[in-house]
Image (cartoon, helix red, strand yellow):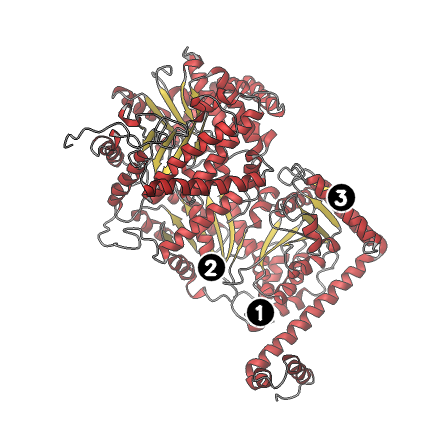
Amino acid sequence: MTEPGELLERAVAGERRALGRLLSLVEQGGEAADGIAEMVHGQASGQAAVIGITGAPGTGKSTLVGHLVDGMTSSGARPAVLAVDPSSPLTGGAILGDRIRMDGVAGGRAFIRSMATRGHAGGLALAVPAALRLFETCGFGPLVVETVGVGQVEVDVTRTADTTVVMMAPGMGDAVQANKAGLLEIADVLVVNKADRPGAEDTRRDLEHMLDLSRITGLAQHWRPEIIMTTATTGDGADQVQTAIQAHQAHLADTGQQEARRQARIRQEVLDRVTQHLGTKASQYLSTNPDALREALNGDRTPAATAAKISKRLLSNQPPI
Amino acid sequence: MTQPAAATGDRAPIRVVLAKLGLDGHDRGLKVVARMLRDAGMEVIYLGLRQTTDTVIAAVEQEDADVIGLSMHNAGHLALATRILQALDDEGLDVPVIIGGIVPEEDVDALVAMGISAVLHPGASAVEVAEAVRGSLGDRSVRD
Amino acid sequence: MSGVPVDPVYGDGPLPGEFPYTRGIYPEMYRSRLWTMRMFAGFGTAVDTNGRFQEILRHGGTGLSTAFDMPTLMGRDSDDEVWSAGEVGRAGVAVDTLADMEDLFADIDLGSVSTSMTINGPAVVALAQYIAVADKTGVDRAALSGTIQNDILKEYQAQKEYIFPPRPSMRIVTDMMRFTTAEMPRWHPVSISGYHIREAGSTAAQELGFTLANGFAYVEAAQAAGLDVDDFAGRLSFFFNSHSDFFEEIGKYRAARRIWATWMRQRYGAASERSLMCRFHTQTAGVSLTAQQPEINIARVALQALAGALGGTQSLHTDAYDEALALPTEKAARIALRTQQIVAHETGVANVADPLGGSAYVEWMTDEMERRAAEIFDHLLELGGGSILEGVYEGIDNGYFVGQIADSAYRFEREVNDGTRIIVGVNAFTEGDDGEKNLLRIEQDTEDLQLKRLAAVKQQRGDAAVRGTLEAVRRAAQDPEANLMPPVIDAVKAYATEGEICDALADVFGRYTEPAIV
């Protein structure tokens, strides 16, 4: 196996295959991933814009991403895309199909990596920022993360972006559903795709109405997301989405929120790592100390009280019960 | 619930790029195979129809694929196999290629001699398909 | 055979030839006229295929059926290095320019034959080339008789031989319907094809529901383009699969006739009897042929052909037993034709119209097929806000069709895998497979010949005329009121290639990429 250090040198020199391999290593986690994180540390400026794109399946995210990325490469940027799709909860396998549509539109000029959720929230939450840092170290930017906006994991991943684009379409993933899923709260740019369909105007009106309400309740005092109508199949409106993303980033810079978001991201990542670390410890503890569960299992103690007792022991590094 | 791979050091799922080169539009077999591999716990990067050697190679590099699966349906298998193996060789990529589809028995030996890892015929079972993928990796099937 | 005299039909209720035509579109069915035994052929260069055509005509045939090679079907020229290399002339004949179409029909009177052209994405170019041959040989366009498949909707759903996105493609189809309605009264501008939907893995009920829905979509599109339903509906025809589940297939054909007649009368206001009749061609299921013990495919094909005959098909293609391995050899193709000749002349099924009508099981199956198709129509109407056409567009866009078909295909494979479905020679009774050695091989010579041919045509033609006519095609594409047929005919006559004309259209319409529904 090629050492990560050598891989990183080659990846930074522009070898896509080496970057592909490194991405697998950080996705896999563990010691190799930690080692790569150390090597990359200080090399990535943390300045590349991170754009999150989310929305219900079938709203046209991948095609729009293709157009956005196409526009970015045309203006001289080197975008990279992380396309996150769910793994099968039953088998752990996944079919990752976003690449076709993006690549078809973007003509093969962007680096696209498909990532499966692999059934564990913690792993994905760690893998995404690590992958983004690798991209940046290799000179890519802007960085686009596309997720299916259905689960909390995906929403969380997207929420760490500088600019979050929430996509919907008449009939599927419409304004009401998006609102229920908590997607409106995280949106910096709203896109109504399939603008040529009947119902697109209704979706837009619904959105305006909801934004008005949230303004009254004070949820969105600093930034009112612009609503862009697009037809991803033809690329109509993609330029306006790009402009709206840039406007939002200028807003972040002007108001100092860019730094606040960066800090929030680091905080979240540290929190995720601690959570995962503790979770792993707890899991190992239960595997190696089956007796610890006995009181809960035979009903002498509530699960909550058992958990409190184990947590206390774990955190104070006391020996097993 | 399964443990996070990061925590246990479990091996990562095998990643397979599935594509159809050329103009032929029969993708029934490719789609069935995609589901079979998913159900065998693998990650399928599905490229689908009308791919070129360039798009397949780009996907293999960027997606760090372990195996390439190509569907063939219109008697062009010898020419297309030559083309993809040449392209892999040019790029210095050592990734096994499996071909599925209508391939006359007498051509199977020629394809294998050329460097194709396995040839799957229509009607191959889910077990056969998954075994062909794992088998093509040999002792690499446990990923480093 | 024993000489027992039989009536043309048995039973009461609506008889064959009576609305809603469940039992057949003609009163006496095959007793008055047998189904047409139409065999699909074509490979190599246009000159090779012309030789086959001449032979068919010498033997008294009047129907010519053309299979094109993959580059031609996808709107790519033979000299397209990325897409065509290795595929020229392999699965059918290569037609790049009018010169090839002239070779294909050299010394054949287009006014006296009926031609079937199986092409969809670039159908407008192929029809224009055919018309141009007629114009140049002095045959009146109104005398041209035949069918062009031109069923673009099923391409997005199943066969995947599309070029442009659905809406502009439908505009091309309606332009062709308008043009043929005005100038070519004997031409069938669309053959609505469930065959490929089934081959892609659908169930019989999905084949029925999706295909008829596509038919309704063409009717709605043509009506929206200002055509009167009775001016074109009589020239729409269908193309179904005949798979192995015998009674399901028969129920499917009977339900198709009943649904079509009912909907055409009630929903689309058709009055002419021809508009109500669902006429169809049938082909046995290529996908059911096994590579293992290939000879036993002859028995499968015979039973599938029998289902087609009992279901009242107007024409039939029987597959060759070696088609799971390669293009058919001449011997295998002959056995396939002999198979349907046995069904027609030896079994006696042609003596009585709808001989299974009245069977409790067959009538139940017919009703069940109709009910399942109705569920599909309801879903599409909901997707399309009351319009089948819009519902079909939406179903293409959101992956409904490909998803449903992929689900069915996967279910089928799993059943074969776990043995709940038996396929003889594949997962049961597997002894005795000694392979098949005599396979048809297409040599590279064909491609080389065609490349030389195309280069010569490009050398001789007038470049200014090509540029000018292609620009006119682009302008017509930009104008939704214009009809694309006349400028495409002009471009073809200037020897613009199929690829150049498709590129010009793609400049305006864009090219289609399918949603990633696996």
Mark 3: secondary structure: helix
The x and y percentages for residue C131 are 45, 18
Both on one chain, marks 1 and 3? no
Foreground: B51 or C17? C17
Number of disc labels: 3
Residue drawn at x 37%, y 42% is C364
Figure quadrant of residue C70: top left
Foreground: A236 or A9? A236
Q: Mark 3 or mark 2: which is in front?
A: 2
Q: Chain of mark 3?
A: A
Mark 2: secondary structure: helix
Q: Which residue lies under the disc numbered 1?
A: B4
Mark 1: secondary structure: loop
Is A22 rendered above or below residue C297? below
Q: Which residue lies under the disc numbered 3?
A: A243
Image quadrant occupied by the N terminus of chain C: top left
**How many neighbours does mark 2 have within 10 angstroms: few (below 14), some (14-19), or many (20 or more)?**
some
Q: Mark 1 or mark 3: which is in front?
A: 1
Say which amino acid is labelled 2: Asp
Q: Residue furthest front?
A: C12
Say which amino acid is labelled 3: Thr
Q: Which residue lies under the disc numbered 2?
A: B39
Residue drawn at x 56%, y 37% is C393
Q: Chain of mark 2?
A: B
User: How far apart, in angstroms, are the residues tagged by discs 2 and 1?
Assistant: 19 Å
Say which amino acid is labelled 1: Pro
